[in-house]
Image (cartoon, rainbow, N blue to C red):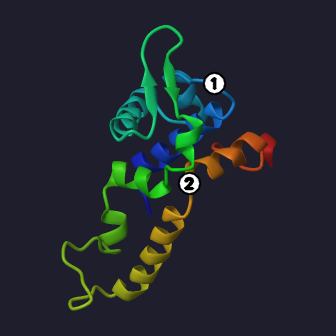
Amino acid sequence: MFSKTCEYGIRAAIFIASESLQDKRVGLKDIAQKIDSPEAFTAKILQVLARNKIVNSIKGVGGGFEIPKKKMKKIKMTQIVKAIDGDVVFTGCGLGLSKCSDEHPCPAHFKFKSIRTELATMLENTNLEELALGVVSGDTFLRYSPAQV
């Protein structure tokens, strides 16, 4: 559904938010480790998130990444997806055709159309804070660990 980059971007934003809820800033190394992503790849994703004002990047001693608590409720998952993948997940053809529409549909067009609509609604109605709270409480996790089963 999402690109790998977008999946890692969502995970990174949720992790940073969960740490920010506990008044902590986190560094690149910790983020990469917690979301199970290579550091260099994570750094590029964080640049995109910072450029799109989803995360704050603080330089220097005591620096790192954070998301102000007040801002978390306002950041919709849609913003993260669009920042990384653009709007192709909301408008693109489910089979990857360059041209696909109601007038000239691919074989799966109308099935994908309803799924895209539901996905867009879910992402627009889900904010970063609610996902981060699940991680903080231990009800949800960002990385599989056999000890969690």
What residue is at 36 percent from the left and 55 percent from the top?
82
Q: Is residue 134 left or right of residue 123?
A: right
Tally the numbered discs: 2
Q: Is residue 16 left or right of residue 21?
A: left
* Quadrant into which the N terminus falls: bottom left
Residue 94 appears anywhere in the view: yes
Q: Which residue is mark 1?
A: 24
Indicate the position of residue 25 as horizontal and vertical percent values. Answer: 57, 23
Indicate the position of residue 35 as horizontal and vertical percent values. Answer: 56, 37
Q: Residue furthest top?
A: 61
Q: Nearer the viewer, residue 127 or 149?
A: 127
What residue is at 49 percent from the left and 55 percent from the top?
77
Q: Is residue 119 above or below residue 23?
A: below
Q: Is residue 131 left or right of residue 27?
A: right
Indicate the position of residue 17 as horizontal and vertical percent values. Answer: 58, 38
Indicate the position of residue 119 as horizontal and vertical percent values. Answer: 49, 70
Q: Residue furthest front?
A: 70
Circle 1 packing at 10 Å, graded few (<14), some (14-19), many (20+), is some
Q: Nearer the viewer, residue 85 or 126?
A: 126
Distance from label 1 to label 2 (Cα)?
20 Å
| Amino acid at dot 1 | Lys
Q: Secondary structure at mark 2?
A: loop
| Amino acid at dot 2 | Asn
* Res. 54 image quadrant: top left
Q: Is residue 23 above or below residue 67?
A: above
Q: Secondary structure at mark 1?
A: loop
Q: Which residue is mark 2?
A: 127
Q: Is residue 95 above or below residue 129?
A: below
